[in-house]
């Protein structure tokens, strides 16, 4: 499996280099990761809230059953049926233990919900920070493009009629360069 590990590390290194050379793409990748984490945190919170509600319903049902057995204990004691009263008390105690376990599970779900909400808040704060950085990077890039445009205009070099995205030669060169880089990656393996 070491060849796969080596390949994986190689690809990760290449990706890191690419992202360092293209910081706006790195910010986009980080924003996408945060979006996914935000989704997962919301899903966790919703699941735990559903679990909490299920446990609450189960506890309420169990409480009604405990009350019923408590009444049976009193009724059996009043009738002098101590054998039934003792067994009913044992059943009531078993149900109380189950109720305590369910209560503990519900408290655990509440804690996970609180932790999930804290995590979600941290993710959203980090997401806002990255969005601010992305806007700053766009502003910086736009300023850089403006500065380059001014420099080009000062040399009487006019790109105003040139549309890079619609240029078939540009597209062909990008495809060729990409294929060349992929071939280089394959050779390195």
Image (spheres, rainbow, N blue to C red):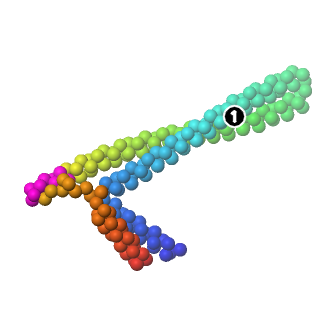
User: With 144 as the anchor, is 187 left or right in this view?
Assistant: right
- Can you say whether 77 is above or below 150 in the image? above
- Can you say whether 177 is above or below 114 in the image? below
Picture coordinates of residue 104 (x, y %)?
63, 39
Q: Which residues are magenta?
A: 145-156
Picture coordinates of residue 179 (x, y %)?
38, 70
User: With 141 as the anchor, is 48 left or right in this view?
Assistant: right
In this view, the residue farthest toward the bottom is 187
Q: Is residue 70 visible?
A: no
At 58% from the left edge and 41% from the top edge, which residue is drawn? 47
At 43% from the left edge and 40% from the top edge, which residue is drawn? 121
Dot 1 corresponds to which residue? 58
Q: Nearer the viewer, residue 167 or 79?
A: 167
Picture coordinates of residue 56 (x, y %)?
65, 33
Quadrant assignment, res 44: top right
At 83% from the left edge and 31% from the top edge, which residue is drawn? 88
Q: Quadrant of the C terminus?
A: bottom left
Secondary structure mostly seen in the magenta stretch: helix
């Amino acid at each position: 499996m070491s060849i796969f590990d080596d390949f994986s590390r190689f690809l990760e290194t290449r990706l890191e280099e690419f992202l360092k050379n293209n910081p706006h793409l790195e910010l986009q990748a980080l924003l996408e990761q945060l979006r996914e984490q935000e989704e997962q945190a919301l899903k966790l919170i919703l699941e735990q809230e559903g679990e909490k509600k299920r446990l609450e319903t189960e506890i309420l049902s169990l409480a009604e059953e405990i009350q019923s057995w408590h009444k049976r204990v009193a009724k059996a004691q009043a009738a002098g049926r101590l054998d039934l009263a003792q067994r009913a008390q044992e059943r009531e105690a078993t149900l109380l233990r189950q109720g305590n376990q369910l209560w503990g599970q519900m408290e655990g779900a509440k804690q996970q919900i609180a932790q999930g909400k804290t995590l979600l808040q941290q993710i959203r704060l980090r997401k806002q920070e990255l969005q601010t950085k992305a806007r700053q990077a766009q502003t910086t890039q736009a300023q850089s493009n403006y500065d380059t445009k001014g420099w080009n205009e000062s040399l009487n070099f006019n790109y105003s009629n040139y549309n890079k995205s619609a240029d078939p030669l540009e597209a062909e060169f990008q495809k060729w360069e990409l294929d060349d880089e992929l071939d280089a990656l394959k050779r390195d393996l």
